[in-house]
Amino acid sequence: MGTTKQEGKNIYIIKRLIDIGLAVILASAAIFGIRTITKDFKDIDTKNKNDESIVSTSDKNKPSDASGIYVSEITDNEKIYSGSLIVVNDETEYKGNEDDLVSIYDVREKANADYYTVLDKDVKVRKEAAEALNNMLKAFNEETGHKDIQVDSGYRSVKYQQEIYDSTEDKDTVAKPGFSDYHTGYSVDLNVVDEEGNSLDFDGTGDYKWFAENGYKYGYVVRFPEDKTQQTGLDYRPWHFRYVGIPHAYYMTQNNLCLEEYVEKLKTYNYNDSHLELENFDGKKYEVYYYPKDTNGSADPEVTELDFTMLAVPSEKEYTITGNNTDGFIVTTLIDNSESVSENSDSKESKADSESSASE
């Protein structure tokens, strides 16, 4: 007699918890062993410090243990379709919801911000994106003196996108309903208006180039860069900014990556393999890895699809989880400033990539 989906889920959870428990024990033993071996090598190094025949080596492929012990967190697979790193384009449909949307106008009023305007009260984005946007516009005003930025667009429902699509003659210039980056709630359009309220358009040049060059400090990037049309599927749109969060915006900017390229790159940093370690512009260090969703593993072969994932997360570190909108999760962990980044860290890759781009 087969088990129900819930029973299969319970059996799977117990099995995973046992596996995780054994992994914790093995990890603890490994750490103890590594510390003992390290101490022995230090003793040997001290005794032979004057012996030139002793050569120091390092294993650059050694996985980092910067985040320490990991524990299991049961995560609903529906969350794959939410978070600041989800990719929505002509090939990947949006399947998320409208949770946590706030009016940018209300955020502006609450902050008593007179350094930018909002088209109307219906322009909304996710709460974290709204707060970061307000901070970015404040910094722009303080550095340039401009008060002529207007936030023209934010979240769009599929229904509203359908109306725009139907009314647009050239369909190649607008995303299909359900396949628009605006559906995410993490995108905004900026515009420039004069004192009479006339639109001057935002072309990203002059003083307004500041946003492309400094947006990463607030978690924002240009969603559709000029040299990434093949990857994004849309032409250059200097006015369209996307919140991806810190430290991702900095890494993307330094390495000239659009969102499609970055999220695809992160899939090479699987939880079970090496993790991406990077240093943000403010000196804080982070560890990022990809974790695929659990699709089966139940004791009952009749249960072929699970609705949750036993996601591995750091037990003693601050972390965030975002989906990629297709097949898995991205975990970003803040590492204490006192922690050192391992030699296989991509913070070095980031620097190398930047230098390579500059030489080109």
Image (cartoon, grey):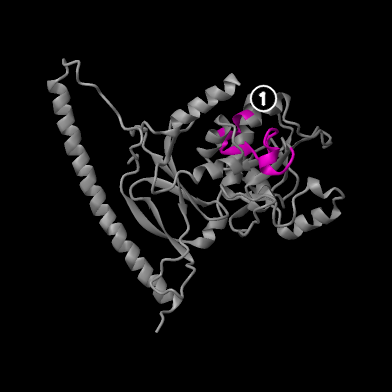
In this view, the residue farthest toward the bottom is 1
Residue 222 within the segment the image draws in magenta: yes
- Regarding residue 134, the answer to whether it shows in the image is no
Looking at this view, name the residue that lies furthest to the left. 47
Q: Residue at x 17, y 18 (%)?
A: 49
Along the line of sight, the residue nearer the viewer: 323 or 303 = 303
Q: Is residue 311 magenta?
A: no
Residues in magenta, as a range: 213-235
Q: Residue at x 28, y 54 (%)?
A: 23
| Image quarter of the N terminus | bottom left
Q: Nearer the viewer, residue 297 or 217?
A: 297
Q: Which residue is mark 1?
A: 144
The answer to whether residue 294 is visible is: yes
x, y percentage for residue 66? 34, 40
Q: Say which element carries label 1.
A: helix
**Where does residue 116 sit, x and y in percent of width and height?**
70, 37
Does residue 146 appear to the left or right of 250 in the view shown? right
Toward the right, the furthest residue is: 169
Q: Measuring from the top left, give residue 60's x and y in whole percent.
A: 35, 32
The disc labelled 1 sits on which kind of residue?
Thr
* Residue 100, image quadrant: bottom right
The image quarter in which residue 239 lies: top right
Q: Residue at x 71, y 31 (%)?
A: 147
- Which quadrant holds the C terminus? top right
Residue found at x 53% / y 22%: 355
Q: Tell me how many marks there are.
A: 1
30 or 205, which is in the foreground?
A: 30
Q: Nearer the viewer, residue 187 or 303?
A: 303
